[in-house]
Structures are given as structure tokens and as C-alpha cells.
Image (cartoon, rainbow, N blue to C red):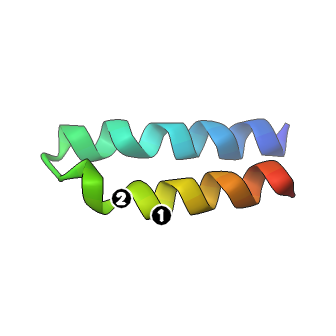
Amino acid sequence: MAGTAAIGAVGRLPATAIEEGRDLSSMCGILAGTAYRLVSA
């Protein structure tokens, strides 16, 4: 259950960035790295 919640949180980050008007290209590395670490954990 905790893994599912963590993956959901990573999925929510881009939506929040868009809502705040941030550039998603600056977040790509962070999101990819975080998702990789969560999936492989």
C-alpha cells in the first residue's frame, strides 16, 4: 500500500508543477530518478 501511495505522489508532481506554471523540463530528471528508485525498492 505504501508503494502505491508513493507512486501516486510521483504522478501528482507534474500536475502540481503545471498548476503552478513551472517548466516540466526542469523536473524530468527528478521525476525519473524518483520513480526508478521507488519501482526498484
Q: Contact, CB < 8 Å: mark 1 with mark 2?
A: yes
Q: CA distance from mark 1 to mark 2?
A: 5 Å
| Crowd tier of the residue under label 2, counting other residues whose Cα lies within 10 Å: few below 14, some 14–19, many 20 or above | few
Measuring from the top left, give residue 39's x and y in whole percent.
78, 48
Q: Is residue 21 left or right of residue 9?
A: left
Q: Is residue 33 left or right of residue 36?
A: left
Secondary structure beneath dot 2 equals loop
Marks counted in the figure total: 2
Residue of label 1: 30
Q: From the viewer's perspective, is residue 12 above or below residue 30?
A: above
Residue at the (70%, 39%) spot, across then down: 5
Q: From the viewer's perspective, is residue 1 above or below residue 30?
A: above
The amino acid beneath tag 1 is Ile
Residue at the (22%, 39%) spot, across then down: 18
Measuring from the top left, give residue 17's x and y in whole percent.
27, 47
The amino acid beneath tag 2 is Met
Residue of label 2: 27
- Disc ID at residue 1: none
